Amino acid sequence: MPSMRRFEHPSLGTVEAWNDVDHDATTGIVTYQTHYRIIANDRHYSAASKIQFTTQERLAVLLDEAGLVIEKWLGDWKGRHLRTDIARDYSGRWARVAPSAVTTPTFPT
């Protein structure tokens, strides 16, 4: 598992943690799970979350319909320029893509 990591908890001891990700291309919904396994007793805990990624084009339409004006598209939470030559896949890795293939803004780690 690429996201596997271990850490020491003060009362539980060694804990393994990892994430699983699934993308439904039809709905645009990404489901991710965070897992924790306590090594000492082999107990497993997990939590799942779902995020829907809206394309930039669809978001522009929704904002226009709401009467809002887009002053500037930003590429991440730090205000960097929106890049259309790269996109992050759902495992968090960057990949170069053809400009026509990018439909959503990129986000920081």
Image: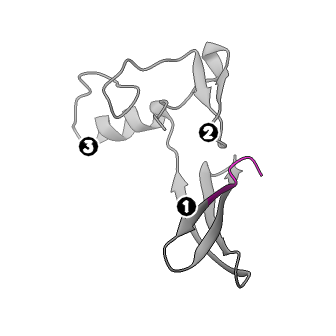
Identify the amino acid type marked 3: Ala
Location of residue 98 by image quarter: top right
Disc 2 to disc 1, how far (Cα)? 15 Å
Stretch in magenta: 1-6
Determine the main secondary structure of the stretch shown in magenta.
Answer: loop
Question: Which residue is depicted at the point 47% across and 30% down?
Answer: 105
Residue marked by disc 2: 92
- Which mark lies nearer to you, 1 or 3? 1
User: Is there CB contact under 8 Å for labels 2 and 1?
Assistant: no
Identify the amino acid type marked 2: Gly
Report if residue 4 lies within the magenta region.
yes
Side of 83 where 70 appears, left or right: left
Please, what secondary structure does the residue beneath circle 1 have? strand
- Which mark lies nearer to you, 2 or 1? 2
Disc 3 to disc 2, how far (Cα)? 31 Å
Disc 1 to disc 3, how far (Cα)? 25 Å
Q: Position of residue 43 (x, y in %)?
A: 69, 83
Residue marked by disc 1: 50
Q: How crowded is the residue under tag 3: few (<14 C-alpha within 10 Å), some, or many (20+)?
A: few
Q: Nearer the viewer, residue 52 or 75?
A: 75
